[in-house]
Image (spheres, rainbow, N blue to C red):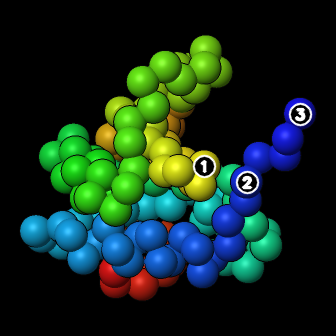
Amino acid sequence: MSQPRTFTAADLSKVLGQAGSRLGRKIAAYLIGGCAMTFMGKKIVTKDIDIVFGSAADAKDFASAIQLVGFRYVLRPSIGYNALGASAIMEDSRGMRFDIFDRQVCRALEISEAMKARAPPVSEL
C-alpha cells in the first residue's frame, strides 16, 4: 500500500492563492484540522485541506474556483467521507484533496461568530 501524498504550507498557499485569484469576489474561508496546524507551524505537512465557509454560496464559488486550477469532484467518496458531511470533496492529479464545508463540519460542529473572531488570519489570498 502506498503512502498518501502530503503537502507543505507552501504547497497549500500556492493552491489557495491560485484559487483566490479566480474568485470574482472576496470570501472568508476557515482552515481546520491538519491544514490549520500546518499553517500554525504545529505540523510540517498535511494530507488534505479541510476548509469551512460561512455560506453555501461561498463554498460553491470556491469549488468553482479550484476547478479552474485543476481540481475535480470526487464522485464516490468512501463511507468515512460521507460521514463528514462535506458539501464537496475535490482532488487534483497530485492527490491534494479539499474537503469543503458549508458552515458545519461532521454534521455537528458549526462555525460560530466567536470561532471566526478567534481565527488567526493566514493571509488575504
Amino acid at dot 1: Gly
Can residue 115 be spotted in the picture?
A: no
- Does 92 appear above or below 28? above
Amino acid at dot 3: Met
The residue to which callout 1 is attached is 95
In the picture, the quarter occupied by the C terminus is bottom left
In the picture, the quarter occupied by the N terminus is top right
The residue to which callout 3 is attached is 1
Q: Quarter-wise, where is residue 79 in the image? A: top right
Kindly identify the residue that appears in the image at 42 percent across and 84 percent down: 123
Mark 3 or mark 1, which has the lower sequence index?
Answer: 3
* Labelled pair 3, 1 in contact (Cβ < 8 Å): no
The residue to which callout 2 is attached is 5
Kindly identify the residue that appears in the image at 49 percent across and 19 percent down: 76
Of 28 and 98, the residue lying toward us: 98
Q: CA distance from mark 3 to mark 1?
A: 15 Å
Tag 3's secondary structure? Answer: loop
Amino acid at dot 2: Arg
**Residue 5, image x and y in percent?**
73, 54
Kindly identify the residue that appears in the image at 38 percent across and 56 percent down: 70
Q: How many marks?
A: 3
Of 14 and 41, the residue lying toward us: 14
Mark 1 or mark 2, which has the lower sequence index?
Answer: 2
Taking the view exactly as shown, the residue that stands out farthest to the left is 24
**For this view, does 95 lie left or right of residue 115?**
right
* Labelled pair 1, 2 in contact (Cβ < 8 Å): yes
**Residue 109, image x and y in percent?**
50, 37
- Does 94 appear above or below 21? above
- Does 77 appear above or below 29? above
